[in-house]
């Protein structure tokens, strides 16, 4: 806590300014939501008035330094893109059902429905096993392909073997002397 009288005043002023800045930012978010709702409604007059109110709020907040100039420009550009894009259909995101969620759902449903969920899980497991069997049939083909390079290496070894005795012969006289 500040001990000096001027610092105590400064703390109070800073708190007042912070609250005012929060009010500006909150009203800007609300105005943006109103513009989006107007765009979804499709009435050009309502869109125009909502847009003017939004830009006016942003300019006022920028003048009071509640928003930085670049932030204000970004927000104005964003609302312009929303208006230019026009009304959008809202689509809900489809969620994937995993085994974990399927077991949670099975715990909540009756016994008759639980049997149906277990059958679905069993069918999914058999579908997972099928690719493993396909890999087992492909394995011998891969082994045969692996043997061919080994044969090439064997053909290359005799050439190396011929060089090795020559080197040994060359080294032998050095050892004797």
Image (cartoon, rainbow, N blue to C red):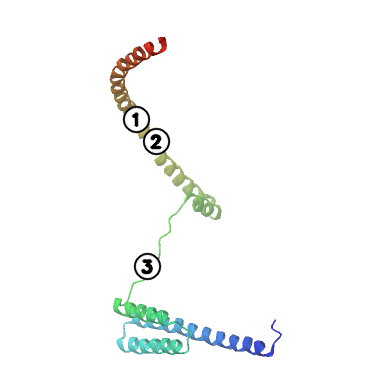
- Which of the two labelled residues, at mark 3 and mark 1, occupies the earlier sequence position? 3
**Between 67 and 125, which is closer to the camera in this rendering?**
67
Of all residues shown, which one is farthest toward the right? 3
| Closest to the observer, 100 or 137 | 137
Tell me how far mark 3 sits from mark 1, CA to CA. 44 Å
- Say whether marks 3 and 1 touch (CB < 8 Å): no
Toward the viewer: 160 or 121?
160
- Which residue is denoted by mark 3 in the rendering? 91
Q: Earlier in the sequence, mark 2 or mark 3?
A: 3
The image quarter containing residue 128 is top left
Quarter holding the C terminus is top left
Q: Residues within 10 Å of mark 3 (few under 14, many from 20)?
A: few
Q: Position of residue 80 (x, y in %)?
A: 33, 80
Q: Secondary structure at mark 3?
A: loop
- Whether residue 116 sits left or right of residue 87 in the image: it is right
Q: Residue at x 38, y 87 (%)?
A: 55
Q: Which residue is mark 2?
A: 132
> Looking at the rendered structure, which numbered label has been put on residue 57?
none
Q: CA distance from mark 2 to mark 3?
A: 37 Å
Instruction: Name which residue lies at 34% across and 81% down.
Output: 39
Could you tell me how far apart the alpha carbons at marks 1 and 2 are, in whole angstroms?
Answer: 9 Å
- Looking at the image, tell me whether mark 1 or mark 2 is earlier in sequence order: 2
Q: What percent of the width, then of the height, locates residue 118? A: 48, 46
Residue 93 image position (x, y, % from top left): 40, 63
Residue 139, by quadrant, is top left
Residue shown at 50% from the left, 47% from the top:
115
Q: Residues within 10 Å of mark 1 (few under 14, many from 20)?
A: few
Determine the secondary structure under disc 1.
helix
Q: Secondary structure at mark 2?
A: helix
**Res. 137 mark:** 1
How many marks the image carries: the answer is 3
- Which residue occupies the foreground of this view, 146 or 135? 146
């Amino acid at each position: 806590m500040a001990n000096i009288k001027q610092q105590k005043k400064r703390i109070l002023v800073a708190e007042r300014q912070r609250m005012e800045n929060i009010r500006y930012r909150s009203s800007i978010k609300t105005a943006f939501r109103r513009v989006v709702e107007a765009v979804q409604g499709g009435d050009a007059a309502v869109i125009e008035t909502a847009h003017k109110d939004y830009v006016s709020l942003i300019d006022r907040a920028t003048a009071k330094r509640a928003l930085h100039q670049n932030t204000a420009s970004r927000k104005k550009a964003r609302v312009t893109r929303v208006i230019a894009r026009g009304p959008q259909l809202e689509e809900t995101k489809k969620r994937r059902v995993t085994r974990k969620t399927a077991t949670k759902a099975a715990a909540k449903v009756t016994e008759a429905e639980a049997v149906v969920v277990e059958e679905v899980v069993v069918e999914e497991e058999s579908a997972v096993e099928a690719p493993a069997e396909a890999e087992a049939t492909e394995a011998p083909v891969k082994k045969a392909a692996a043997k061919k390079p080994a044969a090439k290496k064997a053909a290359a070894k005799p050439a190396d073997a011929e060089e090795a005795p020559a080197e040994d012969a060359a080294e032998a006289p050095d050892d004797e002397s």
